[in-house]
Amino acid sequence: MSLAQYLQDAWYKQASWLIVLRPLSWLYGLGFRLKRHLYQSGCKSTYTAPVPVMVIGNITVGGSGKTPLLIQLVKYLQQQQIRVGVISRGYGGSGPFPLLVTSEVGAAVAGDEPCLIVQSTGVPMAVGANRQAAIALLLQSTELDLIISDDGLQHWALARQIEWIVLDQNRGLGNEKLLPEGYLREPKSRLENSSVIQHSKTAQSALNMHLAIGQPYLLNQHCDTSPFNCHAFFHVVVGIGFPERFYQTLKQLGVQQFQAHEFADHHDYKIEDVYFDDAEVIITTEKDAVKLKTLLKKYPNFNTPIWVVPVDAVLSADCYALLAQQLQPLGIHIS
């Protein structure tokens, strides 16, 4: 188990030994507040894009459902004839950055989440740690009405007109401590006076979302296999921020027998990671499938079936109403 996985497990269980990391959390908090003050006071400059920017992010480490929500918003805006583009840091990609992401660009170059977003929506997208450079490259390639930033909530150098914070109610805020004692990137006070989208089927807020499970599909379709059988035994290959959510998804599908093989978020898969002693099938997430698909191209004779479980974000009507309300002053009208 890697250090990152060990920490995530401790955060999830709220292990008592995490208190020894409190001095580091104090230092992290001090650095965070100083950086924020420098931008808010004008000591460090922020970049304002020529088109409105909407940031979708979270204040916790690990998965919150942010990417499925972004994908659903992009699809909705495209249906409304809004010219939308997306930027991202491109975490896990090798670049060179800034980089336009197309269907031909692999996850090793652009990162897994950007590739999944483009694969799901066909949206114009650019990635790079320098968000200003990514926006410039994106606008050189196409005309846009709105840019959505995938994450970047703590990227104070980028001015934004709209912010949505996704909060996973299943995980909550843990021990409510900043990194590394807890898994908060920012104090929970950040949620005050913000547009917070609760990720839960039983959310108490009117602004909420949940994930609807789609029909599993076969990644390596050349494999001669029977239809998906939830009663079979599976090897679960998962490298996401909060793997427990995927296990819950599998149980909702009726999958009860499986062995979990957890990897760090954005893990760069090797063929050895998916070779097992038996001939049982593999099941994974769409995010992991983006990287595994590239891996399979290098190993066309790999014959173990890999099933992929798709999910779609279902947003409450109030989320769409809020979006229309926030876009209207920016000159973007949704009918």
Image (cartoon, grey):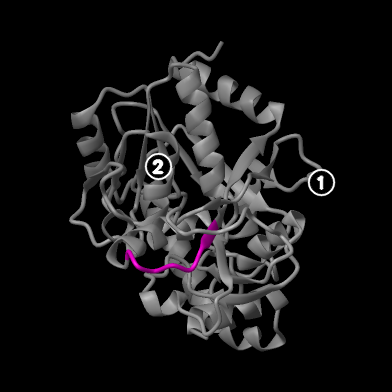
Q: Are marks 2 and 1 in contact (CB under 8 Å)?
A: no
Residues in magenta? Answer: 300-307
Q: What secondary structure is found at the residue carrying circle 2?
A: helix
Is 317 on the left-hand or right-hand side of 51? right
Residue 220 drawn above or below residue 16: above
Q: Residue 119: which disc?
A: 2
236 and 217: which is toward the camera: 217
311 and 322: which is toward the camera: 311
Inspect the image, locate mark 2, and give the three-letter code of the amino acid beneath it.
Gln
Q: Residue at x 35, y 63 (%)?
A: 296
Tell me where residue 182 appears, x and y as whole percent: 61, 73
Tell me where residue 11 appears, x and y as whole percent: 64, 75
Residue 217 drawn above or below residue 139: below
Residue 249 drawn above or below residue 77: below
78 and 253: which is toward the camera: 253
Of labels 2 and 1, earlier in sequence is 2
Mark 2 vs mark 1, CA separation in Å: 30 Å
Residue that label 1 marks:
202
Q: Residue at x 18, y 30 (%)?
A: 140
Tell me where residue 295 appears, x and y as whole percent: 34, 65
Inspect the image, locate mark 1, and give the three-letter code of the amino acid beneath it.
Thr
- Estimate how packed mark 1 is, as few (under 14), some (14 to 19) or many (20 or more) residues with alpha carbons within 10 Å: few
Is 293 on the left-hand or right-hand side of 96? right
Q: Residue at x 36, y 74 (%)?
A: 270
Give the quarter of the image for residue 259.
bottom right
Give the quarter of the image for residue 260.
bottom right
- Number of labels in the image equals 2
Residue 10 drawn above or below residue 290: below
Asked if residue 9 can be seen in this view, the reply is yes
Q: Residue 82: which disc?
A: none
